Image (cartoon, rainbow, N blue to C red):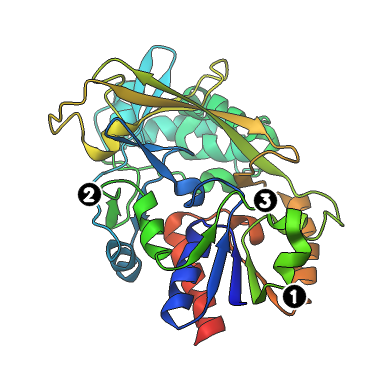
Amino acid sequence: MFDYLIVGAGLFGSVFAYEAKKRGKKVLVIDKRNHIGGNIYTENVDGINVHKYGAHIFHTNDKAVWDYVNGFVEFNRYTNSPVARYKDELYNLPFNMNTFSKMWGVKTPKEAKAMIDKQVKEAGITEPKNLEEQAISMVGRDIYEKLIEGYTGKQWGRPCKELPSFIIKRLPVRFVYDNNYFNDRYQGIPEGGYTQIIEKMLEGIEVRLDTDFFENREEFENIADKILFTGMIDEYFDYCYGELEYRSLKFETEELNMENYQGNAVVNYTEYEVPYTRIIEHKHFEFKCQNGENIPKTVITREYPADWKKGDEPYYPLNNERNNELYQKYSELAKKEDNVIFGGRLGMYKYFDMKDVIPAALELVEQELS
């Protein structure tokens, strides 16, 4: 009946579906959720576009990727500048001269580097063996203990000493007064939210929501010539080698009768004793306070990291040695599937930024449809 069945209406599956339809293919998209868009789904609440599954900021250095997404919707000029809160102290992120100045009273890059060097020397770290040692070697003990240790421990559900060092290596550290989290040339939020991008990609394509591939597996395996599966690769193979590990998230969203709750889109809570990692105030992604729009309410979301168990929504692959070895076993099984392709963060067991999802999906398009 179809050339392609796409399991999952998130960004990866939707890009592939859009490109396949352009090339004359008949496509069916299914998703077990009751909406399209996967984790970038946004929902309008009293004029505020709420990121239902956490903050998503599009950023890239690839002009072709930027032009591609802007072909569906116009993006604003939002710049990601989160604030970290430790007890009653507030610090700018990413770690930059504003952070160092607030932490130590230093004024110049030379003074900041000298303070970090002093603390690294005192810690006696020469070759970092875990995340804690890596973080201290990058920014010193003070910043590690106040702004990294508790937050990261909550995020990953284990002490920093038990986490691999590579997790922290991509954290920006800059000796300039610049609160822009990303260095990418292009950055923004779609005006009107992300859902409209997926709507335009899936326009004219049959989409079935509230539809679980595994509840009617035999039917769906025979409904199309090929399947693009963007769900969990271990679930597809019935966990025959065991379960891959993930981190999950829980969201607590609240509508407040005030114009402005925290003055910033993202505030991280870095104390371990505070159970959530951050509070998102959605209207600041689209300047609905700064532009003087008359929206007397605001919507905030507290984000709680959680252990994953079967049946929960998986968000972050836990790419440690054990899981990567297990994934390789599933990857070998996947290669033996003649008419099934695995894609996306769950199908490939890989953390993807949005800027990475699009070229990965387009690369698959070239392999399959060119």
| Distance of label 2 from label 1 (alpha carbons) | 41 Å
First of labels 3, 2 by sequence position: 2
Q: Amino acid at mark 1?
A: Lys
**SS class, disc 2:** loop
Residue 209 locus on image (x, y percent): 56, 52
| Distance of label 3 from label 1 (alpha carbons) | 21 Å
Placement of 241 over or under 22, stated as above or below = above
Asked if one can make out residue 178 in the rendered structure from this viewpoint, the answer is: no
Q: Which residue is mark 2?
A: 76
Q: Amino acid at mark 2?
A: Asn
Residue that appears at 27% across and 21% down: 297
Q: Of 236 and 6, which appears nearest the observer?
A: 6
Placement of 323 over or under 298, stated as above or below = below
Q: Which mark is residue 319?
A: 3
First of labels 3, 1 by sequence position: 3
| Distance of label 3 from label 2 (alpha carbons) | 33 Å
Residue 151 locus on image (x, y percent): 53, 28
Q: Which residue is mark 1?
A: 335
Between label 3 and label 2, give the one nearer the viewer: 2
Q: Of 176 and 254, which appears nearest the observer?
A: 254
Residue that appears at 87% across and 57% down: 240
Give the quadrant of residue 117.
top left
